[in-house]
Image (spheres, grey):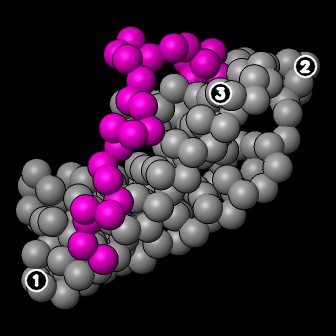
Amino acid sequence: MTTPPNNPESEQKRREKSDRYFRLSQRLLKHAQQQLELGDTVQASEKAYGAVSHAVKSYAELRGWNHYNHYRVGLILDQLSEELADPNLVTLHMAVKALHDNFFEYELSTVQVQAGIDAANDMVERLGNIRNSPIKPLTSSSLSNEQRRRLSQLMQPPVQEQVPAENLPPLEDLPE
C-alpha cells in the first residue's frame, strides 16, 4: 500500500496541508528570483531549494508519505521518477541540491544560480502537475524490492510530531 487508508477527514487535512506547502513553494520561487536580481546568490539559492522541497512535501502529503528530512525528499523523488518513468526528476533535483550546498559554500556564480532557479521552476511546475493528477495505486506485485524498501520508509510515521497546517509559515505574512 502506498497511501494511507481512505479517511475523509484526514484526506481533507492532507489536501489543505498540501495546498499550503505548494503555495509556499511558489512564493519561495518568486523570492529566489528577486534575491538573485538583488545580487544575493546565497539567499536566492536557498529559497529555490526550499521551493522544491516544499513542492515535494506538497505531493508527499497527498500520498500520506513521511517527508520530514532531506533523505526522504530524495526517496520521494526517486519513487516518483520510477512511477512516472521520468529520470529527469532526479537529474533536476541534483541540480537544485547544488543550490542548497551554495547556501553553505558560496561557490556558484550568478549564471549558475540562475540555471538552478530555472531547474527549480521546472521541478515545481512538474510537481504541481503531478499533484493535480489522480494518484495511481501501486500493487505489491508490481513493485521492485527497491521500491518496497523505499515505500516502507516513506510510510513510517515521523519520529517527530507532524506539523499542523496552521503552523506552517503564514502566506499572508510573506511579501509578494
From the image, state whether disc 3 or disc 1 is nearer to you.
Answer: 3
Q: Earlier in the sequence, mark 2 or mark 3?
A: 3
Cα separation, mark 3 vs mark 1, equals: 43 Å
Residue furthest to the bottom in view is: 37
Question: Badges 1 and 2: C-beta atoms under 8 Å apart?
Answer: no
> Which quadrant holds the N terminus?
top right
Within 10 Å of disc 3 (Cα), the crowding (few <14, some 14-19, many 20+) is some
Question: Badges 3 and 1: C-beta atoms under 8 Å apart?
Answer: no
Disc 2 marks which residue?
Answer: 141
Residue type at tag 1? Gly
Cα separation, mark 2 vs mark 3, equals: 27 Å
Please provide the residue range marked out in magenta.
Answer: 151-176
Within 10 Å of disc 1 (Cα), the crowding (few <14, some 14-19, many 20+) is few
Disc 3 marks which residue?
Answer: 10
Disc 1 marks which residue?
Answer: 39
Q: Where is residue 38 in the image (x, y as percent from the top left)?
A: 12, 85
Residue type at tag 2? Ser
Residue 159 is one of the magenta-drawn residues: yes
Residue drawn at (42%, 24%) of the image: 162
Within 10 Å of disc 2 (Cα), the crowding (few <14, some 14-19, many 20+) is few
| 40 or 28: nearer the viewer | 28
Residue drawn at (50%, 56%) of the image: 22
Cα separation, mark 1 vs mark 2, equals: 51 Å
Residue drawn at (55%, 53%) of the image: 19
Q: Can residue 90 be seen in this view?
A: no
Residue 13 in the figure: left or right of residue 121: right
From the image, state whether disc 2 or disc 3 is nearer to you.
Answer: 3
Which quarter of the picture shows residue 159? top left
